[in-house]
Image (tube, rainbow, N blue to C red):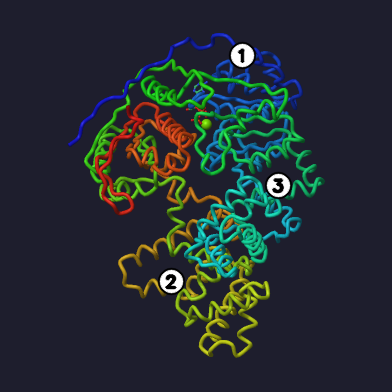
Amino acid sequence: MTNSFTLPSFVHSAAADGSGGGGGAGSDSGARSGGLSLSQRAMQGAAPPYLAGLNPEQRQAVETLDGPVLVLAGAGTGKTKVLTTRIGHILATGRAFPSQVLAVTFTNKAAREMRERIGSLIGGAVEGMTWLGTFHSIGVKILRRHAELVGLKSGFTIIDMDDSLRLMKQVIEAEGLDKERWPARQLANLIDSWKNRGMTPDKVPAGEGQNFGNGTGLKLYTAYQQRLKDLNACDFGDLLLECIRLFQTHPDVLADYHRRFKFMLVDEYQDTNVAQYMWLRLLAQGCPNLCCVGDDDQSIYGWRGAEVDNILRFDKDFPGATVIRLERNYRSDGHILGAAAALIGQNKGRLGKTLFTDGDLGAKVTVTGVWDDEEEARTVGEEIERLQKSHHPLNEVAILVRASAQMRAIEDRFITLGLPYRVIGGPRFYERQEIKDAIAYLEVVANPLNDLKFERIVNVPKRGLGETSVKRIMEYARARSIPMTVATREIIETEELGGKARRGFRDLLNQFEHWRSQVDRIRHTELAELILDESGYTAMWQADKGPQSQARLENLKELVRFMEQFETLAGFLEHVSLVMDTASGDDGDRVSLMTLHAAKGLEFGTVFLTGWEEGLFPHQRSLDESGLQGLEEERRLAYVGLTRGKHNVRVSFAQNRRLRGLYQSAVPSRFVY
Ligand code: ATP
Ligand code: MG
């Protein structure tokens, strides 16, 4: 039973382009240029080609190079385009060298795209832009250069969520707390909220420190940080937090960066959290030419500590800021824009903006009701096949979901149909067990202090090292604040463990030493193969007769192939810890599947928005935890979803949905009315 109807949708206005505004255009371009031909053109009044297509407000945002600039504008108005062109302009007019421009984006994908776009404007010089990336990737780069100053060694590892949870579990146990009653995940949220607010343990307010585990929250946080240091490791939050601490405690280091960065640019500024904001402010003290772009209507990371206030008080934080608004939408057809505007118009807490398009009205947004999630997946699959037949590129098709659990049904359907797809923002490839194991081996070779990885593979494949022996080593290591590998060395010289375990551990340590000695001798891809063979890991899957083992062996091969792209093992491992979203094969023509959160900043010809049902979208948890604010954030998320589409947006809801194994009847989301 399928029925379709349409959302009311309308076009706001259709003002002609080029009317009014744009006073600041041409203010300083080329004035201090390095004598490039582009800047000469600029001085002669002929605009360089990359400026020609911009509207007056966009041009102002590109050419106002002195002082703080904020571009506050709706979806698809060219904010990211402005940012990219501005960088091109800075470099083309010789206002700075590529290495003197700091550009921050929200995802690795966005960073890659920005690099490509700048490359197409200015060519090879983009290679020199070593400071273009996400907050995290730039943070890690800074930390690597000054690791010792914050108590780390330069080869430190960045641990993922899994490892971080495991470490927290250990800390909770060591404190003698009941781990059932005090789950690590809850501690993780608490510590995360402190890190998002830029708080090292000494900055946590007394009252808050009493939270969790019978008042031990702060103590556990302190212990967790200490464990990370012992392991020579950082979690994601630390990448910024430790930078902030570094800048605050070493003014000379900060001053060095002040001298370095002549221009700073930030995309998606509405989603910065306090820690990111502090980090930016510290750097911006020495760099008046900060340009931020964003849209308060697209603030969707409040649940992770983002503060939309950062964007709303920009001109107070950075006095003398030029605030520029863009109103013409270049992305979506009229009906899509109309539907999006009607939806977001229901939010109370917003600045309010006008958006218009000069383009066609295009197709209306369709809303389709289906029986259940399986039928939804079938319908989407069929529609995509139809699009494929009419030569619609799959790269221009996306399915955006509210919760990643919705992906399974869709993925299954795509696999059945043989529709090529990629998952964006999801650690799909790297989440596979065999990939995690292989990387664990490589990590331990690169960093012998990485206990978490050591623990992961110590008995994989089985070496007769039971849980008790491993536990004994862990206790031994913890009691002496030494890494597990060192503890193992010591313990096998004693009678503590049985003969079989001792032999097993000794062999493993010797193997690691051997592999480590090869790091500078052979290619890292060869080393990876050597490790997988000599450790018996490959053999383990070869012997396994399970249905998955063949695929696992292929994945391992794929991993080694992928490593080819990197110069060194360290380079590869760094990539692994940062660039989870390139993993699922970015090549070829594929449908994109991702959460709404991961869709920020992207655009597609056709967008499917599935699962628009009460409880799923808006998500019940947001409503329960944050009431009206939660609802408004969900609505902004819906707005982000609608505004990803250029020409076709298809919303669907199911009357029955399986959520966490339960089959429930559902009512359509309030967002479709
Ligand atoms: P979002 O808020 O979703 O991140 P945005 O404001 O960053 O959107 P962009 O992604 O920069 O918007 O631009 C949206 C689309 O409009 C892109 O395809 C871009 O190339 C196009 N565009 C922007 N400005 C112009 C222009 N002046 N002329 C032609 N196309 C433009
Ligand atoms: Mg953008």
Kindly indicate whether the residue at mark 3 contacts the one at mark 1 (C-beta within 8 angstroms).
no
Q: Nearer the viewer, residue 612 or 448?
A: 612
The answer to whether any part of residue 527 appears in the image is no
Horizontal and vertical percent position of residue 418:
28, 48
* Residues packed near mark 1 inside 10 Å, few (<14), some (14 to 19) or many (20 plus): some
| Left or right: 532 as drawn, with respect to 306 | left
Label 1 vs label 2: CA separation?
A: 63 Å
**Residue 209 seen from this side:** yes
Q: Which residue in the protein does label 3 denote?
A: 244
Q: Classify mark 2: helix, strand or loop.
A: helix
Q: Is the CB atom of the residue marked by disc 1 within 8 angstroms of ligand 1's nearest atom?
A: no
Residue at the spot x=64%, y=61% of the render?
219
Q: Which residue is mark 1?
A: 22
Quadrant of residue 62 in the image? top right
Image point 62% across, 56% down: which residue? 210
Would residue 227 be found to the left or right of residue 257 on screen? Answer: left
Camera-side mark, 1 or 3: 3
Foreground of the two, 435 or 76: 76
Q: Nearer the viewer, mark 3 or mark 2?
A: 3
- Residue 106: image location, x then y, percent: 55, 40
Amino acid at pointer 2: Thr
Residue 465 vertical placement versus 653 (above, below): below
Q: Circle 3 sits in a helix, a strand or a loop, which is it?
A: helix
